[in-house]
Amino acid sequence: MLSAQLKQDFRSPWLRGVLAIVGVTVLVNIGFIGYAFIFPPNLVVKDYYERGKNYFHDQHIRQEELPTAWRLQLMFPDPLSVNAPKLCRLYVMDHQGKPVRSGRVMLTAYRPNSSADDFKVALKLVDAGTFAAPVNFPLPGNWDVIARIDAGGQHFDTAQRIFVQK
C-alpha cells in the first residue's frame, strides 16, 4: 500500500519539478566546488598570516620613518595595450628631495585573478632620479604593479593598479 502511494506521488508534476530543481542545484554546487579545488584563483600569498601580522605590527615603525622616506612616482603611458611594449618610468627622490642616482629597481606586475601571468622587469637608471624600461603586458584587464627600489641598504616601494586594453 505504501509503494502504491509513492508511485502515485511521483506521478505529480509538482513533486518532480521540486526534486529536479533540488537535484540540479546540488549538481551545480558540486561542480563549482570541484572547479575551485582543481583551478584555485591564487589570490592569497603563501605567507599571508605573517605578512598581515607584520604589516599591522610594523605600522608604527613605518609612520616614524615617514620623514626619512623617499618619494616614488610610477608613470605609465596612456593607453596601455596588450603585447605593445611601452616605456614605464619610476621617478625617485630621497628624503632630502634630491634625485636618487643609483639603486636596483624591480617592477613586479600581478594579475589579480591568476598568478600564472605575473612577471618582473628590472628598471635601469636613465637619468638622475629616473629609472625606466619597456614593459609588455601579455593579457588585457587589471594589473597590480609594484615598483621597489633597493639602494644604500634601504628599500622603498610604490604600488599602482593599471588597466591594459586589448
Image (cartoon, helix red, strand yellow):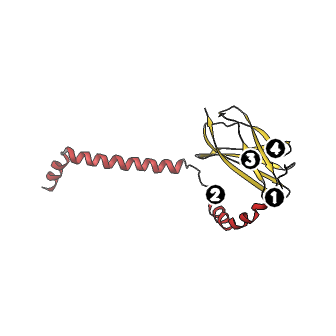
Q: Which mark is residue 46?
A: 2
Please state which amino acid type lies under the numbered disc 4: Thr
- Label 3: how many residues lie within 10 Å, few (<14), some (14-19) or many (20+)? some
**Labels 2 and 3: the sequence-earlier one:** 2
Kindly identify which residue carries mark 4: 130
Side (left or right) of 153 relative to 84: right
Q: Which mark is residue 154?
A: 1
Pick the front one: 54 or 11: 54
Pick the front one: 134 or 101: 101
Side (left or right) of 157 relative to 9: right
Q: Secondary structure at mark 2?
A: loop
**Labels 1 and 3: the sequence-earlier one:** 3
- Answer whether labels 2 and 3 touch (C-beta < 8 Å): no
Is the N terminus in the top left, top right, bottom left or bottom right quadrant? Answer: bottom left
Kindly identify which residue carries mark 3: 73
- Label 2: how many residues lie within 10 Å, few (<14), some (14-19) or many (20+)? few
